[in-house]
Image (cartoon, rainbow, N blue to C red):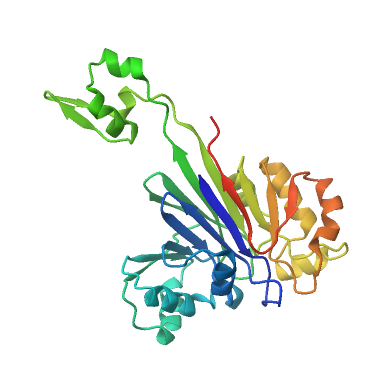
Amino acid sequence: MLDVCLLGTGGMMPLPHRWLTALMTRYNGHSILIDCGEGTQIALREKGWSPKPIDIICFTHFHADHVSGLPGLLLTMGNAERTEPLLIIGPKGLERVVSAMRTISPELPFPVECREIEGDCQTFTFDDLSIDAFRVNHNVLCYGYSIRVSRRGQFDISRAAALGIDRKYWNPLQKGMNVESDGKIFTPDMVLGPERRGLHVTYTTDTRPTQSIVDNAKDADLFICEGMYGEKGMEDKAISHKHMTFQEAAELAAKAQVNEMWLTHYSPSLVRPEEFMSDVRKIFPNTMAGKDGKSRDLVFKD
């Protein structure tokens, strides 16, 4: 199961009832945070989720509404007596930006590693979870992210029995481990069926529509996409500032054939995004206006 929470849905500045856009996912003891603007800690507290177990922070780009909450978050994690390493992923310049922000959070009881994304796309793999970073089109270097959880094939008891594999080795093989017995080495592919459908969440914000979004969101269980403007007649402004309208986001969702889309990163002037959903759903029916704290438990489908 992959827990997904849209901590905030605002763009540019936090509002009394809308924190800045950030996403947190939890899977098998691992927590990933994408973006960390001003007030992200408060959004976490309101949700009841702890920042202490965050393993990875991904930055889409280095505008303040996406990164300025980092120093406080690091201090809170340190005050919680965290000692495990923290990995931060982001565009070129990440080391410089993180170092600058750490001047006000210099002493931490855990190491911080920065990995800068190389090229237009890069995959970071952690056991059965992977993060795909892909370049999008904003007025600064900016990336979207796809989080994928792979799922091994089903264990074939008849194949294991035919090979004479002792039952005590079945569980390690199911977990993807090689085992040795009586001088023979058994590998998971000997007893597992084809890989099953896993879980897939794509998150993108601060961008114009791009083919890279369609390609990386293809068949996603959940697509979280910026919708800076809901009102009609905002197309020129969206182009000028390199953001998206609700309608453009819906067109991407339809092209990528995702299961569900949540809109986020609203303009501060956009008070009630749900008022524009009827027109958006004519393009992509399974569209939801994201709200702070909106969450979903994604489960494997047999």
Residue 41 picture quarter: bottom right
66 and 78: which one is in front? 78
Tell how many labels: 0
> In the rendered view, does 174 fall on the left or right side of 143?
left
Residue 22 picture quarter: bottom right
Q: Residue furthest left?
A: 183
The residue depicted at 54 percent of the width and 51 percent of the height is: 3
Position of 135 relative to 217 (above/below):
below
Position of 77 relative to 229 (above/below):
below
Q: Residue furthest top?
A: 162
> In the rendered view, does 91 fall on the left or right side of 16?
left
Position of 69 relative to 92 (above/below):
below
13 and 228: which one is in front? 13
Place of residue 234 in the rendered image (x, y in percent of width and height, measured from the top left): 83, 66
The residue depicted at 34 percent of the width and 15 percent of the height is: 158
Place of residue 53 in the rendered image (x, y in percent of width and height, measured from the top left): 41, 63
> In the rendered view, does 33 fall on the left or right side of 160?
right
Place of residue 278 in the rendered image (x, y in percent of width and height, measured from the top left): 86, 51
Residue 45 picture quarter: bottom right
Position of 106 relative to 135 (above/below):
below
Q: Could one spot residue 62 in this view of the protein?
A: no
Q: Could one spot residue 155 in this view of the protein?
A: yes
The residue depicted at 23 percent of the width and 20 percent of the height is: 165
